Image (cartoon, rainbow, N blue to C red):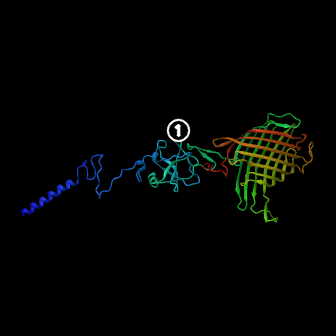
Amino acid sequence: MIIQAVALSWTLLLSQVEGQESAPPPGTPQEGVSSDPGTTQQQPTDTPAQKPSPAPSAQPGGPVSDLTGLLTPEEPRPSLRYDQPILCTRLPSTQQVPSGEYRMQCDPVTRRCLIAPAHELDSSGEETDRPLLRTSYCDRSEVSAETRVQEGYRFVPAIAESPPGWYRDEQGRVMQFNFDLHRRIYLGGAWAPLLRHGNDVVTDRVRVDFGIRTEFPGGEEDHRLHRLTFLDTEVYLGQSSLDFTLVRYDFNVERKVPLFRITTFFGKPRRYDFGLNLGAWVEALHQESIEREDSELSVLTWAAVHGTLDLWHSEDLVSFVRLRAGPSIERDRTHGMNTLVPTAALEGDLTLDTDGFHHLLFSAEAEQVLLGDRVEGRPLRPERLRVRAGYELILLAINDQPVSLVVDGRGTWRSDIPRVAAKWEWSGNAGLRVSLWAPARRSAPLASAR
C-alpha cells in the first residue's frame, strides 16, 4: 500500500511540472516565433500563419474610422441624378463634413458610389448647418461604409442632385437656369414715347403692366395646350390710356387624324397628310380707355369668341403662328350703345431657346365696329388697325425670380375716336419686367444631362 501511494504521488507531481512547461510566461518566445525581429523561424504545421492587419480605413468588415483614404475624386466633379434612386446615409466624418451625413447613389455595375454632403458648404468647403434645397426623395440606408468597401465599391465626391431646370454648384447651392414665361405673375414698367403723324413726339409717356399667365397640357385623343390669362393690364401715363382684360382663354391642338390624305401615283405611291389644327380663343370683360387731343373713348368688350388656325406650331405647342377671327360684343360707354365688332388677326408667339430666355411676339389685327348709332365726328362704321412686334430677354434672376428686358414697337390706326382725325400713331417701349413666379419649363432638362 505504501509503495502504491508513493507511486501515485510521484505521477501527480510530474504532470504538474509538464503543464507549467507547456504554458510559458508572457514575453517568452514561443515555438516557431523568433525573439529576434530579424530572425524568421518556421511555424509548426498545425498552427496557421498570422497575417498583418490592414489599415483601419480599409479593413473588410471592420470599422472605417477615416473616409478620406477611401475617396477617389474625379474631374470634373460628377453630380447625382435626380431621376435615379438616392440613399441618405451616415459615413465616417471628415474635416470638411464633420456630421458625416451624405446623399449617396451607387452603381452596382461600375462599383462606384457618388456621395454628396447633405448640407451646403461655405466658400472654404466646410459644412454649414443649412440643409440642401430642392432635392429628391431619399431612402434612409443602414448599409455601412464597411459593407460597401467589402463589396468592392469606391467613393467618389459629387454634387447633390437638382430638379429639371435647376443647377447646383459645388457648395450645394441651387439656382434656376430654365424659366417658363408662359406661366408667371409679372410686373413691369417701360418708357413709351408716342409719335402721331403730323404731331410732336410725346417723350414723357411711361407704361406700367401687370398680369397672371399659366398654361397646361390636356386632351388624350389629341395633343392640346390650354392657356389662361388673368388681369392683363397696361396703364399709360402721359397721354393717358388703359387696356385691361379680366380673363382670356385659348387652346391650340395637334390633331392625330389628318383631315385630308392625298396620295400621288407618279412612280411609287406616296401619301401626304394634311390637317386643320383648329382651336378657340375667348376673352371676357376687356376695358379700353383712351385719350387723344380733346376727346376720350371708353369701350368695354363683354365677350369675344374667336376661332384659331395654327399655320405652324412647335412640337410642344408652346410656340405658334396662327390666324384668329371672330366676333365680339362691345359696349361703347362714352356714347351709351352696344356694337358688334368682327376681328381678324395674324399673330405669333415664339420661344427661341430651350431655357426660355428669348421670346418674340408679333401680331397684326383688323377690327370694324358694326351696328352702332351714328356719332358726330366719326364714320358710321369705324375701323381699327393694330400692328405690334416685341422681344423679351431674361437678364438675371433675383431669388430665382427672372428680371427681363422688354422692347417692342406698336402702330395703331383708328377712326372710332370722335373729332380726332384717323392717322397712324407709333409707340416704342423699352423697360424691365419682373416675373414673381416662373417655374421651369415642362421640357426643361436635368443639369447633369446638359
Q: Residue at 85% across / 43% down in the picture? A: 412
Q: Does residue 242 lie above or below 107 as drawn?
A: above
Q: Residue furthest left?
A: 2
Q: How many marks?
A: 1
Looking at the rendered structure, the kind of residue marked 1 is Ser
Q: Does residue 199 lie above or below 180 as drawn?
A: above
Nearer-the-camera pick, 259 or 398: 259
Q: Residue at 14% across / 57% down in the picture? A: 13
Q: Position of residue 425 (x, y in %)?
A: 85, 40
Query: Which residue in the protein does label 1 denote?
Result: 124
Quarter of the figure with residue 389: top right
> Left of 274 or right of it: where is 8?
left
- What kind of element bears circle 1? loop
> Left of 277 or right of it: where is 169?
left
Q: Quadrant of the N terminus?
A: bottom left
Q: Position of residue 9 (x, y in %)?
A: 12, 59
Quarter of the figure with residue 61: bottom left
User: Pointer 1: residues within 10 angstroms few (<14), some, or many (20+)?
Assistant: few
Q: Position of residue 400 (x, y in %)?
A: 64, 43
Q: Position of residue 103 (x, y in %)?
A: 52, 49
Nearer-the-camera pick, 392 or 10: 10
